[in-house]
Amino acid sequence: MYDFTNLSDVEFEKLSADILSRKLGVKLRYFSPGRDGGIDLTDDVAQKNIVVQVKHYAKSSFTSLLTSLKKEVDKVDELKPTQYYVCVSQQLTATNINEIYELFKGYMKDTSNIITRDILVEFLEEESNQDILRKNFKLWLLSDKLLKDIFNNNVFIDSEVLLEDIDDEFKYFVQTKVFNEALEILKKSRLIMIQGSPGVGKSINSKMLAAAFVKEDYIIRYTTDGQVSNIKSVISQNPDVKEVILLDDCLGQYYFSLKEGQDLELISLIKYIKQYENKVLILNTRVTIFNEAIRSRLQFRRYLDKGKLPIKTIDIDGISVEEKAEIFYNHLSKNKIPKAYFSELRKDKKYRKIIEHRNYNPRIIEFVTEEYRFSKVSPPDYYNFILNHLNNPMDVWADEFEQKLEEIDRIFMYTLFSLTDTYTDINALEDCFIFRLNNEGRAKSTVNLFDEVKSRLTKSLVRIMDVNGSRKIGVLNPSINDYMNSYLHLNKIGLNAIKESILYIEQLEKIFEKEEAEKILISKLISGEFINLKSFGNKKIEYLFYGISKYNILTDSYKPIIKSCFQNIDKSLSFFGEKLEKKDLLVKFLEEPALYKFYEIEQNLKNEEFKDDFISNLDYKGIIEVLSVIKNKELSLPGLTEQLESDFFDSLDFYLSDDIEIYDYIEDIDGFEVFYDLMPPEEHSKEFDEEVQKLRSSVRNLIAEELRSQLGKKIDFEAIKEELEEILEITISKDKLYDAVERHLYQENEPDFDDYPYDYDNRGYEPGDVDQTDIIFERDYPEVE
């Protein structure tokens, strides 16, 4: 079943033209029947033997459809075509069809000249017409109730934020040539990095690409925080599980923000995805951030230089005039711009100046078509309103913030900015907002300023959603963060106002440079003010341990926290961009005599609960380091030593079974890469994946034996890596490689996507004598209901 209601009238018209061209065996062309506007389809612009009228009234009554068709009667009488066809998105009764036939019976063979919804559906379900369906991506995606299943959570997507984004943005999406090319790249390589300038459509194209794979029974894994380790931890280790991983703004939202080691995590994730035919990776980033990543991360640059990650750039100059027009029209139509506004844009074809403007950008189009804004402008002024924002794109949000917001609204927005680049807990925002108002003497005991401002700004600057029972809040559009970030870098007074009202550790991380943030942290730790700070998760506890261990801070009020909170420290930590592990903190507390004595580590370790918390989340390398410190410092900790030695093998086995990335080693071996170079990624078979799994298992067992034999010795990990490579070279001989290539390269495989030969550019219609933008705008625009 196909849902035509989600298509714009332009999209439905293109679909109908494709279908009718094939049904009638002619190449239809657009033509303008007269000065009063409207665009029809014909087989011959000069002769007009066949004329087709398309009416997309899927959400309207039959009465409305009939009224519109009656207006066409005089035009048809003037044209006098041999055959006249009416194509509608409504399902019509026999009586309805007869009523339409009576209007045009002099130009119709019979009622079969009236193409209804059921006829269109029947046509699209035929095997021979699947190429037409696939060219119309939105309709293909909507078939089989796919999006309905997604929105009802019948298809698993592990982010409610993404669900809401797809639901909201789908209606605006236009299937551009860039999108089609990106989809083809993904089908072949299962990897893509989409880059482009702010607002050109990186995110919406990435989300629609991910949705395309849901159609093939894939699970979506999604993140916007750049934490590769987090997304990697939830990817299924089962190679048969179909997963598409989408990392939005993978290198940072508005500046390069990969922390130390995260580029290697990203490379590792890419290598992992390449090993399995059922895993797909979609990355996107801004061009400027991508260039900075290449400049400042040598290993990332070297990996990209190998050409193993397909990169697709979305350039506004690469979006055709027709596509720009359709993006503009979709925003006008789906935002229900009143007909009076649309009519103003049609006068003297003003819409052309908007579409062809040098600063045209989908984000600006989104801004000027939102009801909150256009409703404040009269229809005669709407064109100039749009033009002003295109002429001054940097002022899109400046006017909003500086002229239309009250001071209390700006405080609300900058407080939100200080907490997050994406979404944050609404209660945390309220805490920070009230804290700042109290600091500045702006609080009012008789008015709930937070609720007042929140209500005023919702749907204009912020949006609120429910995520797993927790209410989250974030900016409505990423460009709002761009503006606030730029503004704060130029406004020291505004930046200082935020700095003086820091309540959450996350604000400290986001607003301050590393050196200044660390000074403030140490100052608050020494003064004891640190206790008043808040954080999400365990971050406050982790920073407390970090500061105490790094600067030898000895404060009585911290003793109970040290005694009770070691279990809250994760294995891997990051402090102001500095990457540490729990073992590094433990080593400090054991090595530094002042910390060891003041915080009574030896005495506390006699308590079983403290001892278990102390060494929780240690991997086998951490255990070895802690054991080395105990031995070198000659600490009398027999209970801890015994427990660590006992835990070592369990930790080692866990690492070998879950964490060791054998594919990193496999890819680096001379010769093995030949296999991937010779064999196209789409030819990877299940049999090959199974062989790789067997190889990994064999390698793990060999490593385990080697490591077990060296317990008690100093383990040389570089030597083990060399030994691993030798093992792999022995396991994978050149003969085996070429046998595998021949076996897998030439066998027939079932493709993930339907194997229909379709050409996105080969449509069933041509512009004829009508400008492509006029085809979209010169139409009977519906009244807003």
Image (tube, helix red, strand yellow):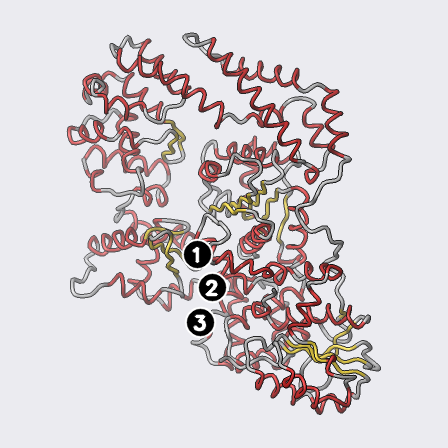
First in residue order: circle 3 vs circle 1: 3
Helix, strand or loop status at disc 3: helix
Mark nearest the camera among 3 and 1 is: 3
Alpha carbon separation for disc pair 2 and 3? 11 Å
**Residue at the spot of label 1:** 483
In the orientation shown, which residue stands out farthest toward the right? 47
First in residue order: circle 2 vs circle 3: 3
Q: Is residue 683 left or right of residue 696?
A: right
Q: Residue at x 47, y 64 (%)?
A: 396
**Residue at the spot of label 2:** 396
Q: Position of residue 632 (x, y in %)?
A: 33, 9
For residue 535, which quarter of the picture?
top left
Q: Position of residue 779 (x, y in %)?
A: 64, 79
Alpha carbon separation for disc pair 3 and 1? 18 Å
Task: Tell me if residue 74 comes above or below residue 211 in the rendering.
Answer: below
Give 6 or 572, whichever is nearer the viewer.
Answer: 6
Give 104 or 520, whichever is nearer the viewer.
Answer: 104
